[in-house]
Image (cartoon, helix red, strand yellow):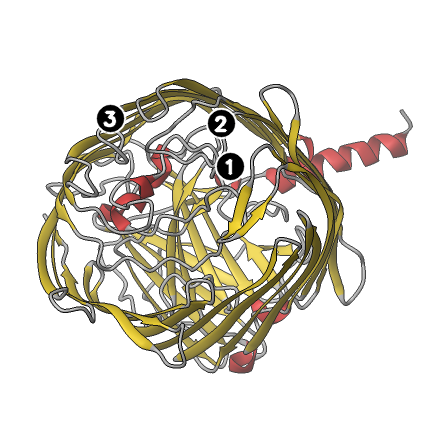
Amino acid sequence: MSLLRRHAFVSLLVGAAALHAAPALDVLATATPPRIDGVISPGEWDGTAHSDSFRQVVPLENADPTERTEFWVTYDADNLYVAVRAHDAAGLAGIRAYSMLRDDNNDSDDLVRIVFDTFHRENDGYYFVLTAAGGKHDGLIQNKAEANDQWDALWHGKVTRDAGGWSAEFAIPVKSLAFDPANKVWGFNIARAIRRKQEAVRWSGFIRNQPTISLPNLGELRGITGLRQGRGFDFKPSASLTRHSAPAPGENKIDFKPGFDLVWHVTPSLAATVTVNTDFADAEVDQRQINLGRFPLFFPEKRSFFTQDASLFTFGGIQQDPLPFFSRRIGLADDGSPVDLLGGLKLTGRAGPWTLGLLDVQIADHAGVKSKNLLVGRVARQVLDESSAGLIFTHGDPRLNGDNTLVGADFNYTNSHLPGSKTLSVHASVQFTDSDYTGGQGTAALLFLNFPNEPFALFCSYSRIDRDFDPALGFVPRTGIYEAFQQVGYTWHPSTPWLDRVRLDAQLDWVMDLDGRVVSADHDLPSLSFVSRAGDRLHLEYTRTGDRLDEPFELQPGIVIPVGNYAWNRFQADFNTTRSRPVSLSLTVRDLGFYTGHRRDYSGKVEWRASRLFSTSLNWQLRQVRLPEGDFDVRVGEFNAVYTFSPDLQVSLLAQYDNLSAALGVNFRLRWTVQPGNDVYFIVNQGYDAAGDRLRPTRNDTSLKGAWTLRF
């Protein structure tokens, strides 16, 4: 090897090692906790761990940041404290501070995000966000790099803005986290987004195609000792008063529902929760969806009792189908109506290399189904450096008075240390069910392979699902099939002042019945995306779709698609402007054949962030279906307005309408966080019949709920 080639090779290895090298900070406890007011006062953070060693991730990987960022970390027995100073040469004019909302998606604001891997296992963790306007966002991290943003914790955070930039201060109570007190090293990262430049900088993990929450790419906080869990008891009483009313006489009633959760931290890393008369009056309403397909739609879980520690129940890398455990099966009927939870027990946490999730609840009588017990158990063990293997078990069926049992096993392999800091993951799983509902036994086997890197990316999945496979506490829209899915992608980052990246994807998806006949197919050949330096996006897609009907399919009442083999083309264009401007726009146009005829879809969304206090959006969909069997249009509209008095007090109004049901639903919601963990809700759900020439009120549910947290 020539000297020049040897030098180039060594430089490549050194560069790759530097890209992957994880920074570390030695953290010291403080005897004088900082005041969490968003002001980094002189001397307040002296003597604490400090760093300003950030690198740019977007738009340039591992480049110098255009603005300086620095942070400080300390702790005492009860809290971890983090302060961030986001310097900005443009001053107040350069800061994007639109949203004080709790759990907003935060694509519009400058923000800082902190990440903790409290067990330093690179498998699950926590993240906390403050926007430049003071909005708070938090969530769980599961399967190494997947965010579950339905989780809410008790913590404090404040921000201030000035002519030199903005500052953020966090106080995270250790009682809000699961951890191993014998472990003195935590995984940690911190990131900043500068929206007007579409720039992201991080303290660790300068890999553009991997998120800030990617746990294998975290740095380290060292020397964390002496954390105090207290007696380990959280008592969470709640009470709701709900008035149900309808126009018909005798359909008005008032429900008073007191209840409580008692959380006992058996160890700092293992928690037992007892729930009695569980109430979900404060849960957010589902977004309205219209199903023009043959299989059920998926709605995410939004109830806090189930989202807490939800990451410990994940299985086989499966996100939607076929899920062995889908918590919406508990406490909600198929039509979305509530089913009372009389009580339950949950045990979740970690012990050494093991993770454990156990859920046992008793549901009330409903729709002819007697009160019954539902049980879910999940256990997994970390193996190799970054992998895990485990089992899952469910028992009970909320749909009928019969029984259902599911048993599953999975192996999840991850290697995030491939040459060039590339990552590879492989998930293999098998599930077995015995169901009275189907009158038989069934299995589902899946294999996923994911290579989510740049410039080349690859994802493949293969599955087989028996006809009688029936996860009564899970989710599977389609049985009796084989499915093979492959997606390849290639990303360019052109050296132009206006274009950030171009991505080309090809996707092949075949679904066959168990006799080997192709029953549906979707092939994207190709799809192409362009993203500008400002964050605007254009996506173009061509798809060839096929569907085989062995029996007639009623698309809408009176419109029946006959048996046959169908194939059509679909062309789609999406355009989205960046949310870093006060007004943003999203548009989608889709033109496709559709069974025996034709279909055109149009959808759009306009958002206006008038100030930190007020924001509003309008979302609409139009689907025009033209078939020999009959024509129809689907119209769905959604209007949302939010006024935020402060990060702790907000009111929102959500109105949703679709022409098929001719129903207008209006949701008014007030949430006042008196202090973290102590919340008051006032919620009005009003329905209207919009079929005639005027709105006629239908059902009304008005709720007042208070929930408190007492820690011992």
Locate residue 461, reporting x and y percent: 60, 29
Tally of marks: 3
- Residue drawn 55% across the image and 82% down it: 93
Q: Residues under labels 2 and 3: Cα distance? A: 40 Å
Residue ID for mark 2 = 386
Report if the CB atoms under discs 1 and 3 are less than 8 Å apart.
no
Locate residue 224, reporting x and y percent: 31, 41
Residue ID for mark 1 = 216
Label 3: which secondary element: loop
Locate residue 48, reporting x and y percent: 36, 55
Vertical arrangement, residue 149 with respect to residue 508, above or below: below
Q: Tag 3: residue type?
A: Gly
Q: Nearer the viewer, mark 1 or mark 3?
A: 3
Mark 2 crowd level (few <14, some 14–19, many ≥20, 10 Å Cα): some
Mark 3 crowd level (few <14, some 14–19, many ≥20, 10 Å Cα): some
Report if the CB atoms under discs 2 and 1 are less than 8 Å apart.
yes
Locate residue 547, reporting x and y percent: 65, 38
- Residue drawn 32% across the image and 33% down it: 473
Farthest residue, direction right: 2
Q: Residues under labels 2 and 1: Cα distance? A: 8 Å
Q: Nearer the viewer, residue 501 or 30?
A: 501
Q: Tag 2: residue type?
A: Glu
Q: Residues under labels 1 and 3: Cα distance? A: 44 Å
- Residue drawn 21% across the image and 43% down it: 367
